[in-house]
Image: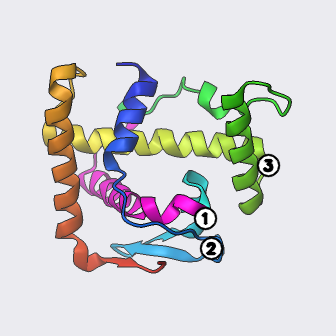
Amino acid sequence: MSKSLKFSFVLLLFILLSGCSNITKYDNDEPAAIVRGQEITVGELRLLYPDKQVLEYLDGAIKMELVKQEVEKLGLDISGHLDPEDNGFAVLPPADTVDPNGRQLREYAESQAKKLHMEPEEFQREYARRVNEQNAYMMTYLESKLGPYHYEVDETEDFNEEANQLLEDLAEENQEEIEVLIK
């Protein structure tokens, strides 16, 4: 399985939809949720998701924070899952691109960068770095609990089910230590 397909698999794995609204009325430094004492700010969410979809992905962001905390608590090393050579995703298409996908990516980066007081290229580099880091935390956690993933099509469904259940259980176990501050 290619790195980009692996990335897509993992990113989609932990994102569970939980609502529909937007966060335009919130400042970047406002806390959106507190997970075991660690704030997730509106700006952190805005870096990864469009304002109109942030609340849809908040549940996944909370689970991601729990995963990160668990990996750190267990003293696991994520470096084996970081992709230091995946720099292509960190490069923003040029402003004059005629490619529709490149143009859409550029427009998104420009829009979010403005809200975060960043340059679009800086936004894209940070976005790519965060996604790479989250992928590494998620894969490290899942493999520590479920064993290595073998990337065989016939095993994907079972692995996804086990992984989703593991994340649901983690959130349930920590429900008392999760406070959602935006609606």
Residue 117 in which image quadrant: bottom right
Q: Which residue is mark 1?
A: 43
Q: Secondary structure at mark 2?
A: loop
Q: Quadrant of residue 26?
A: bottom right
| Residue 10 sits above or below residue 171 on the image | above
Q: Which mark is residue 29?
A: 2
Residue at (16%, 22%) from the top-left corner? Answer: 154
First-in-chain label (3 vs 2): 2
Badge 1 or badge 2: first in the primary sequence = 2
Quadrant where the N terminus sits is: top left
Q: Nearer the viewer, residue 25 or 89?
A: 25
- The answer to whether residue 34 is left or right of residue 174 is right
Given the image, on which type of amino acid does mark 2 rest?
A: Asp
Decide if residue 77 is in sight here: no
Residue visible at 44% across and 61% down? 56
Looking at the image, is 167 positioned above or below residue 105?
A: below
- The residue located at (38%, 60%) in the rendering is 65
**Helix, strand or loop status at disc 3:** loop
For the residues marked 1 and 2, what is the alpha-carbon distance in whole angstroms? Answer: 6 Å
Label 1: how many residues lie within 10 Å, few (<14), some (14-19) or many (20+)?
many
Badge 1 vs badge 2, beta-carbon distance below 8 Å: yes
Residue ID for mark 3: 119
Helix, strand or loop under label 1: helix
Q: Name the one closer to the observer, 137 or 102.
A: 102
Is residue 179 a member of the stretch shown in magenta?
A: no
**Segment colored magenta:** 52-79
Q: Is residue 156 above or below residue 181?
A: above
- Which amino acid does the dot numbered 3 rest on? Glu
Q: Earlier in the sequence, mark 1 or mark 3?
A: 1
Helix, strand or loop for the magenta stretch, by majority: helix
